[in-house]
Image (spheres, rainbow, N blue to C red):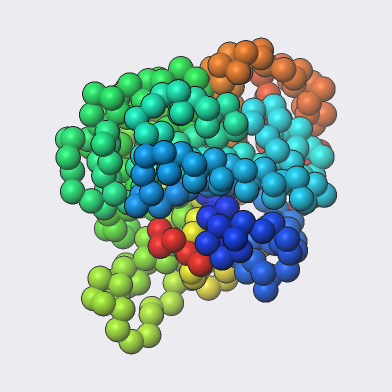
Amino acid sequence: MTYDVFDGHNDLAWYLREERDYSVEGLNDPSVSPFTTMDQLRDGSVAAQYWSVYVHSSITGADAIKATWEQIDAVQRVVTAYPERLQFARTAAEVVAARNSGKVASLMGVEGGQQIDESLAVLRSYARAGARYMTLTWSTTHSWADSATDEPQHGGLSEFGREVVAEMNRIGMIVDLSHVAPSVMHQSLDISTLPVIFSHSCAFGLNPHLRNIPDDVLDRVPGNGGVAMMTFVPSFVSNARREWVEAGENGTAPEVTVADVADHCDYVRERIGIDHIGLGGDICGIDELPTGLGDAGQYPALFEELASRGWSESDLRKLGFDNAMRVLDAHEDAYTAFLGTSATTDPATTDPSTGTAGKTGTAGMTGTAGAAASAGKGL
Ligand SMILES: [Zn+2]
């Protein structure tokens, strides 16, 4: 039994930039693209994907804006080149439509707030192009927000940083709190009127890596309605692996397995409940993935492991797809108002698996009928 996946973070676009000079040729060939091929997406039952449009934080100002648009262009060219597998989506309704036609609904997420160059107009231009979330920082603190892995400069969010969060709420762009300092997590949860995501993080309580989510932040996620999407980055997943990295990577790297990722799923579920956990592999963003989760086709191994631990089919649907979909759906009114389109699609015609009323009908997401058949940057 496989379950559809709505993955929070895949760095294929950055991989194409760094390794392929932005060529979108050959993405059916694992020797060209080892971590994400069209067949792997099918094998993994990936039904929706936030493709990351990341640029390294050493790229700043107008260059960062240019590089971000190159990344957006890369994602759009990939989607155009593989129409049998991918379908562009901006709204929740379009995700439903893509999923029902067996395609991977392809959305984008901007990773790193420096890419807006302190301009809300630039932020809005990314959102309009289909970037449905923005990770407020990457690995370095920038002019308006502190990163978890750098020196704080603002005590969290600056005044402008708070304006960014408010504007993201207004336009229906999801606030992503992976990478940010705990102070930014708390302040964003204070400010945000809409559910947040952690697009690719694990639990600090299980492995105290700075990139993971502290317990006191996790505890606030149910009240916000958000979702913590567990990532596969080995040093975030495994204590032993983190310690090995911190000690200088001498000798053989401790193996990280599917069971280690499942441990984070169990931990977060136990702490904040089944409705607030999802998956964000960070596939293509790292050079190595856990044993058994080595590419975009391997998600079923994680579901199998969790099923063996007693997770029900309903639990696994929530983990894989439904919780992430709920957060996107919660932004639909604000986003379609921002685009200047009202909610465009009648749910009854969009998703034949449900006759229920209500926007895109999250209830319909849980149905099985009509469902899809289906050079790392360091973090
Ligand atoms: Zn990242």
* Frontmost residue, 48 versus 375: 375
Q: Quadrant of the C terminus?
A: bottom left
Q: Residue at x 42, y 66 (%)?
A: 234
* Frontmost residue, 322 versus 313: 322
Q: Residue at x 46, y 39 (%)?
A: 65
Residue 80 position, x and y percent, is 75, 45
In the image, residue 21 above or below residue 288: above
Residue 280 position, x and y percent, is 51, 50
Residue furthest toward the front? 62
* Frontmost residue, 96 versus 317: 96
In the image, residue 44 above or below residue 360: below
Residue 276 position, x and y percent, is 47, 38
Q: How many marks?
A: 0
Q: Quadrant of residue 17?
A: bottom right
Position of 301 compared to 175: left or right? right
In the image, residue 18 above or below residue 248: above
Kindly tell me whether residue 265 is visible in this rendering: no
Q: Residue at x 18, y 48 (%)?
A: 151
Residue 115 position, x and y percent, is 41, 39
